[in-house]
Every structure is written in C-alpha cells, then in structure tokens.
Amino acid sequence: MESDNGPVIGRRKLIALIAGTVLLVISYAGILGAFVASGLDDGPNPGPPLALGMALLPIVFAAVAYLSLHPRAGTAVLKAVGLFFLFAVPISALAQDAVTGLVAGFGAGAVVTVDRLPMHTWKSRAIAVGATVFYVFILVRIIPPLGVASAPLLPFTAVAMADYIAEQRTQPGNESAGGQVA
C-alpha cells in the first residue's frame, strides 16, 4: 500500500502487529510477574503467571504470523519460539535483568514471524531489534519503571520501523537515502 508521500504499512500487517503486541503485553506481564513473585520471601506462587506467560508465547507469534499472512506461518512460529529461548535466557543472564532478555526474545521471534516483502531483510530487522534491546538495557537502569512499562511495546515496533525504513529507501527519488531509481 502506498500514498503520495511514500509507503504506508499495510492494514493487514498493522492489525497483526497490534494483535501481537496486545498478546505480548499479557505474556510479558505473566513472565515478569513470575520473576517478581519468585524474588519475594512471602510472595505469591509464581507458577500460574509463568504458566500463562509461557502458554501465550506461541500464540503471540502465531497471531502475528497468520494475521500478516506469512507464507510459512507454522514454521515461522516454531522458529520464533526457539529463537525466543535462544535469546531471552542468555541475554537475561548477561544483562542481569529479565526485562532486557524478554525484549530480546520477543524481538528475535518478531524478526521471523512478521511477513516480509522483498526489500525487508532479516539483517535490518535484527539491527533494529538489537538497538531496541540496547535501549531497554539502558532505560531499565536509568528509569526502571519506564523501562519495564515500555519494553513490551517495542519488539514488534522495532521490526515495523525497520521495514518502513527499508520501504522508504527503495522509493524512487530517495537516492540520498540509499534508494534505487526506478
């Protein structure tokens, strides 16, 4: 979909990203709630919120993959769940906070589940997610409440922004931005 000012994110992709973000917020809250509960001496049982967060994990990625009409949605969801754990666990350990790791995990899953056009590369998406993870890492240390609250809104947003920039660069008349002339 295009306007006179350049590319505009497609309605279908926008719905997929919004639905995925809403589900991601719920999953994130469950997982993070379990981490907080486990750190309290007399806190609630962390099992139920962790179970909710983990149960929603594949649903988050499935919603995005199927709603954005990914051609291999099922495979993308399996890859996304694997990438989530591959990135979330070690980055949480390195950063020594769960928030940064969760953003990394959800972001890695977002890279493979959001449907791509030919100009959308996994590399540009990975760079956007990496920058977002770094931003959250810093934000959680400077303004913790803002970092914790804004973190679940960022993974799919980073992928959408990377795709938007890639579309802008391929528009005719954007040679200074690295675009190709038609």
Image (tube, rainbow, N blue to C red):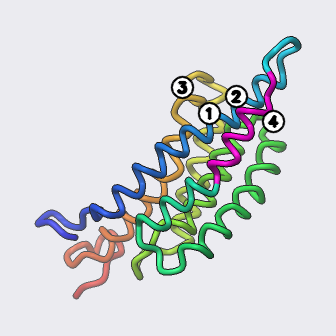
Disc on res. 145: none
Residue found farthest to the bottom: 182
Q: Which amino acid does label 1 sit on?
A: Ala
Label 4, secondary structure: give it: loop
Query: Could you give the CA–CA distance between mark 2 and mark 4, rounded to whole angstroms?
Result: 16 Å
Query: Could you give the CA–CA distance between mark 2 and mark 3, rounded to whole angstroms?
Result: 16 Å
Please rate how many residues cluster around mark 2, counting C-alpha atoms within 10 Å: few if below 14, some from 14 to 19, many from 20: some
Disc on res. 33: 2
Query: Could you give the CA–CA distance between mark 1 and mark 4, rounded to whole angstroms?
Result: 18 Å
Query: Could you give the CA–CA distance between mark 1 and mark 3, rounded to whole angstroms?
Result: 14 Å
Q: What residue type is labelled 4?
A: Gln
Determine the residue positioned at 62% across, 39% down.
28
Label 3, secondary structure: give it: helix
Q: What residue type is labelled 3?
A: Leu
Q: Quadrant of residue 151?
A: top right
Q: Are marks 2 and 4 in contact (CB under 8 Å)?
A: no
Q: Name the residue under label 3.
A: 146
